[in-house]
């Protein structure tokens, strides 16, 4: 099972449609759910990180492999990501990806992570990033299953 815990919600219909399309495709391979926690907004950074941390922690257990999405995380190619996904699934069938809010993630959440992952040194809108993550998860499953997918 894959879970994505994301700070903030999706408001734009075109992004919702893209998310739903990838969720449908991924469900051919595994159970997947997205959990949205409220974004604290543009208050003082430490206050926002603390409040969002508590909201995220409500959904965490000690049974999952936690992957945080961070600008300073490890960058992987799609092939490397699929191999990592496959290896994790051998030992743990529950993977949780965590996407932070405007200020990122608290150090406490980062420290719970078994893999800090970055898609780029660039900054992406959090709503759009969810679509990118789902696309890479889908691509990863296609690669794992030796199924063709456009390059």
Image (tube, helix red, strand yellow):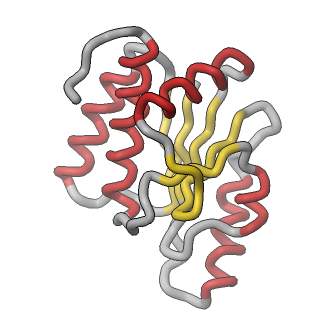
- Position of residue 119 relative to residue 94, above or below, is below
Does residue 37 appear in the picture of this structure? no
Q: Where is residue 114 drawn, in percent x and y?
A: 73, 43
Give the quarter of the image for residue 54. bottom right
Q: Where is residue 98 drawn, in percent x and y?
A: 58, 50
Please state the total of marks drawn on the protein image: 0
What's the residue at 78%, 63% (across, down)? 108
- Position of residue 21 relative to residue 57, above or below, is above
Give the quarter of the image for residue 147. top left
Give the quarter of the image for residue 87. top right
Q: Where is residue 4 drawn, in percent x and y?
A: 53, 43
Left or right of residue 12: residue 89? right
Left or right of residue 27: residue 70? right
Depth check: 143 or 3 in front?
A: 143
**Which quadrant of the figure contains the N terminus?**
top right
- Position of residue 150 relative to residue 11, above or below, is above
Residue that protrudes farthest toward the bottom in the picture: 44
Does residue 93 appear in the picture of this structure? yes
What's the residue at 39%, 66% (across, down)? 122
Q: Where is residue 47 drawn, in percent x and y?
A: 68, 83
**Which quadrant of the figure contains the C terminus?**
top left
Left or right of residue 147: residue 43? right
What's the residue at 31%, 22% (across, down)? 25
Left or right of residue 81: residue 24? left
What's the residue at 39%, 68% (across, down)? 123
Depth check: 148 or 18 in front?
A: 148
Depth check: 26 or 73 in front?
A: 73
């Amino acid at each position: 099972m894959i879970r994505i815990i994301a700070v903030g919600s999706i408001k734009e219909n075109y992004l919702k449609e893209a998310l739903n399309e990838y969720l449908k495709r991924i469900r051919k391979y595994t159970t997947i759910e997205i959990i949205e926690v409220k974004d604290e907004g543009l208050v003082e950074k430490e206050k926002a990180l603390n409040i969002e941390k508590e909201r995220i922690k409500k959904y965490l257990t000690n049974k999952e492999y936690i992957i945080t999405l961070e600008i300073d995380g490890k960058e992987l190619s799609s092939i490397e990501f699929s191999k990592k996904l496959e290896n994790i699934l051998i030992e743990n069938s529950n993977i949780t990806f965590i996407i932070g809010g405007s200020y990122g993630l608290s150090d406490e959440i980062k420290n719970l992570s078994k893999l800090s992952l970055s898609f780029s040194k660039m900054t992406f809108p959090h709503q759009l990033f969810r679509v990118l993550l789902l696309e890479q998860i889908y691509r990863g499953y296609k690669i794992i299953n030796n199924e063709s997918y456009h390059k």
